[in-house]
Amino acid sequence: MQACLTSDMTSSLSPRLADIVDALPLRQGMRVLEIGGAPGAAARAVAQRIGDGHVLVIDRSPKGVAQVERLAASEIAAGRMSVRCVAAEDFELAPGEAAYDLAFAIRVGALDGRHPRAGEQAHRRIKAALVAGGKLFIDGGDPLREIKLD
């Protein structure tokens, strides 16, 4: 069962972003990877919905990572979120890090076809970071579409 977003969290999301978060197949306790997630609004909303789960935001921009750290300081301090500065095509799980149940990305060129070579590598890296049967969703559907990682 999904928990509802608080009114504070809902008001911080654009209608488009709220629709995307609503479309994710989230459940309590999930581990979720957001790719290119700065400034962290979607990740914070996801963290609220998955309870004692965990959201890792990766972003290639140090400035973007700093934004997430600042805006999600309470979620990070509570252990519900973390952030890492890395491009999707270079991402690897840290030693001992558990795999993720689901990954999502919004406006990430390596995943939406704008950068096909980076996309091939990113797909391999994301697949390796997901549990068996884990799914990748990107924007561009209604409002999301699943990317097959086979």
Image (cartoon, rainbow, N blue to C red):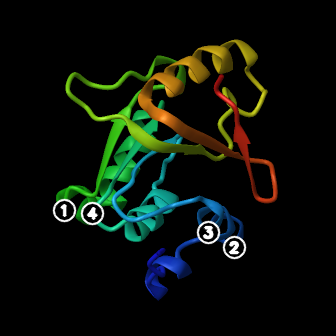
Instruction: Report the number of discs.
Output: 4
Question: Measuring 71% from the left and 66% from the top, which residue is drawn there?
Answer: 16
Position of 75 with respect to 8 (left or right) is left
Find disc 3 in the rendering and name its residue.
Answer: 22
The 10 Å Cα crowd at callout 1, few under 14, some 14 to 19, many 20 or more, is few
Amino acid carrying label 4: it is Asp
Q: Split into 4 quadrants, where in the image is the C terminus?
A: top right
Mark 2 and mark 4: span between their CA atoms? 26 Å
Query: Residue 15 — which label?
Result: 2
Residue 62 or 21: which is nearer the viewer?
A: 21
Mark in the foreground, 3 or 1: 3
Query: Residue 102 — which label?
Result: none
Position of 64 with respect to 147 (left or right) is left
Amino acid carrying label 2: it is Pro
Q: Secondary structure at mark 2?
A: helix
Going from the N terminus, do you reach mark 2 or mark 4 first? 2
x and y percentages locating residue 96 in the rendered image: 20, 27
Amino acid carrying label 3: it is Asp
Amino acid carrying label 1: it is Ala
Find disc 1 in the rendering and name its residue.
Answer: 78
x and y percentages locating residue 71 in the rendered image: 36, 61
Position of 89 with respect to 66 (left or right) is right
Query: Residue 52 — which label?
Result: 4
